[in-house]
Amino acid sequence: MKSYAAGPTIPLIERTIGEVFDDTVATHADKEAIVSRHQGIRLTYSGLAEGVERTAAGLWGLGVRPGDRVGMWASSCVEWIFLQVATAKTGAILVNVNPAYRAHDLSYILDRSGMKVIFLHERDARVNYADVLREACGLGPHALEASVLLNTGQWQSMLDGGVRPEPGVRDKHDVVNIQYTSGTTGSPKGVLLTHHNLVNNAYLVGTGIQWTSRDRLCLPVPLYHCFGCVLGSLQSLVFGATLVLPSAQFDGQAMLQAIEGERCTTVYGVPTMFIAALDHPDFPSTDTTSLRTGIMAGSPCPVELMKRVVSEMHCREMTIAYGQTEASPAITQSMCDDSLEVRTSTVGRAMPCTEVKIADQETGEAVETGVQGELLTRGYLVMKGYDKDPGNTARAVDRDGWLHTGDLATMRPDGNFRITGRAKEMIIRGGENIYPRQIEEFLHKHPGIADIYVVGVPDERLGERVLAWVKPGGEAGDLTEESVRRFCEGRIAHFKIPDYIRFVESFPMTVTGKVQKFVIREREIQMRGLEDAGSVETA
């Protein structure tokens, strides 16, 4: 049996984001749409629609026209949603800008995107964004014509100077959003996503967790990320559900308070967010019994963590979703009624209207069930391409329309998939191929380990050695390098046992909570003096 699956074919939504939003407002005008707890704002759908219309008029007053790029460089807030829908309704293209970007990164995005206007907060606890913007603008010529500070007189002046947008036809296949890949390797690439991509991915993921307008979503994931602004805000708008923003940046305590205080039925997050919530001192006294379902995604989800979320957080229908920005983002998903085994050991099946195959990396042909290969996907969800980058677009999406994810995976006979690692993360130690994901899953079972990430570091004799960064927790007791290795001995292959172990309190992360393994590797090379080994030339 070949490793190929096609999700069920169901009717897709053939409307733009603006049209879907208008339909929801007409149906749920008086229902609570957004609760931004850190801003003290509550809006019904009619109130949200009023804010969207004023924002759209403000954009038009600034000279923004269909096809223009508008940047949003901010953490989670109500204004994010206003701009997300307003740009879609006016025909502009929203450019998501990572709040972690500083002058060099921002200058690159300004240049690549050609954005006309950028919205930002002046500052937060981390940095003065206005200063960073000025520095970025001084690094090169950009097309930027205006910047607007949120929650200031500039934002209000934009609204007051609004001009009713001219009517125009918006096509569902128009690009509506540009999201930049994380840039953990190489320069960030702008992913071009359409109304059709995003509306339907939001709709199908929500259908998979049996969502209705009665659901209330706690969203600690940042809106700048595809997880946040598609499976979070846009999905809420598609279903007429209530979106709860606990805090501007992730805060485990705020996440718990939002779940209890707003009686949330759904919670989304990356694994590190769930770990922070479960390990928070307030967790035992927090009422999370309102939860029914949710999604853990964004990075590999440890089996043991998933079990804790289901049992201790009372999220009995918790699911896993797998995807990437280039796929709008979700490709596979487990279902609410799947067995705990499926929901803890796989990333689910191909979503509706989605093809998935595990391919041989040399031939592109589907491998046999159970054999590892690269995961490819095809369907409505595949991006329109990388912005102004036909070369990388052609490398990512082949002539037959298959998106090459770069992720290694296997397909089980029951049609569920397991992600086994990234091809570029593979460690080759003395001729043995080692996938960090396998070691991480195993060591998550250790009662004294809260979290762990494994990378390869250079070695002159073996090519690479296995290194683990370990965050102690739970029943850590007398946790030592030797005790961790003893835990492994006889239970995993000897060449998979970490050669190096470092105990840490935290990991280097992107703003979305993804661990930056390349940073771990670079730090270890420097600290261990492995530069010479790393410079050995290979074929």
Image (cartoon, rainbow, N blue to C red):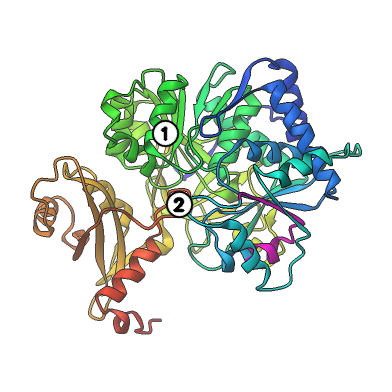
Up the image or down, 531 lies above or below 347; here it is below
Residue at x 85%, y 45% (from the top left corner): 61
Q: Nearer the viewer, mark 2 or mark 1?
A: 1
141 sits left or right of 367 in the view? right
Circle 1: element type:
helix
For the record, the magenta segment spans: 107-121
* Residue 306 circle label: none
Which label is found at residue 367? 2
Label 2 Cα neighbours within 10 Å, binned few <14 / some 14-19 / many ≥20 = many
Measured as percent of width and height from the top left, residue 149 is found at 67, 49
Q: Nearer the viewer, residue 504 or 492?
A: 504
Residue that mark 1 sits on: 254
Which quadrant would residue 52 be assigned to in this image? top right
Query: Whole-Å distance between the Cαs marked 2 and 1?
Result: 45 Å
Is residue 290 covered in magenta?
Answer: no
Q: Is residue 416 left or right of residue 444?
A: right
Q: Amino acid at mark 2?
A: Val
In this orientation, which residue lies closer to the viewer: 244 or 498? 244
**Relative to 514, residue 445 above or below:** above
Query: Label 1 sits on what residue type?
Result: Ala
Helix, strand or loop for disc 2: loop
Left or right: 490 as drawn, with respect to 464: left
